[in-house]
Amino acid sequence: MKISIKAPAKINLSLDVLQKREDGYHEVEMIMTTVDLADRIELTLLEENKIIIDVSEGFVPSDNRNLAFQAAQLLKDRFNVEKGVRIAIQKNIPVSAGLAGGSSDAAATLRGLNELWSLGLSLDELAILGAKIGSDVSFCVYGGTALATGRGEKIKHIAAPPPCWIILAKPPIGVSTAEIYRNLKLEDLSHPDIMKMISAIEGRDYEEICGQLGNVLETVTFKLYPEVQRIKDQMLRFGADGVLMSGSGPTVFGIVKHESRMLRIYNGLRGFCNDVYAVRLIGERSY
């Protein structure tokens, strides 16, 4: 028996950090939404009690460091599953990019194994389990558009933004989320207005959405990796309606309404960095 599942990337339309928590994590408020760039996960039932990872990207681990492996192991341990699975991951989302590729792979694995192993869990139950793997996994279990709070695991669904093009550009570097948070100075932050962004999304006000984009991690990442800011500046010069770094970076995304301008920006950025994608914003929940 085989199951094939899409694992879409996410972007942050707003990302705010409120305080350091006693557990060592940071208290955040984020608005996340899915875009039409996705890994493909194929799960094959094994009678032998083991987890095998096949992955198309050489930089992605195929052992217990892989979040999809951790998702499978978590379900096996929690529900005493004695069957196994082969998890084949076709990577399309760039690695260490601020697009939650690993988290989305883990979420897709949770959803798929729930069916493959006949566990009968609800999405809410899967999202709670996902939070044990990583902060973005809970959101990725649901997809769509949501306000995430706590350390990112508390999810409140909101309406989808109006349809538009998203241009993603990633410089040839990886960024450690832990390093960015270590260098974050909470007292120096200029906080985005999360409620104004929610109102703009719910009112389907495209211009206001572009105007309310904000990510407090940009200042840290730009300082440590100036090439990320150069991509943002370039995207603005090429005429994107709104531009922001996603997550802790290094991917920068631009929002564009019209296809003709999207093509101009896309072609211009192709001469600037290798990993450039033009995709549609999904925004709606698929599950």
Image (cartoon, helix red, strand yellow):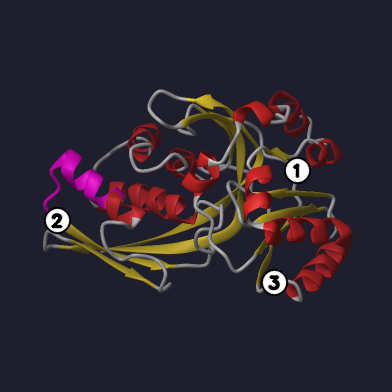
Three-letter code, disc 1? Pro
**Residue ID for mark 2:** 83
Q: Position of residue 229 (x, y in %)?
A: 73, 55
Point out the stretch of residues depicted in magenta. Answer: 71-83
Q: Residue at x 50, y 40 (%)?
A: 182
**Mark with earlier residue (3, 2):** 2
- Report if residue 5 is visible in the image: yes
Q: Report the side of 49 relative to 133 (left or right).
A: left
Name the mark on residue 162: 1
Three-letter code, disc 2? Lys
Relative to residue 260, is residue 283 depicted above or below?
Answer: above
Q: Report the side of 41 relative to 264 (left or right).
A: left
Relative to residue 55, is residue 103 depicted above or below?
Answer: above
Q: Residue at x 39, y 32 (%)?
A: 124
- Report if residue 118 is visible in the image: no
Q: Residue at x 49, y 56 (%)?
A: 101
Circle 2 sits in a helix, a strand or a loop, which is it? Answer: loop
Chief secondary structure of the magenta portion: helix
Q: Which residue is drawn at 83% across and 38% down?
A: 211
Three-letter code, disc 3? Cys
Alpha carbon separation for disc pair 3 and 1: 28 Å
Q: Nearer the viewer, residue 79 or 115?
A: 79
**Residue ID for mark 3:** 273
Q: Are marks 3 and 2 in contact (CB under 8 Å)?
A: no
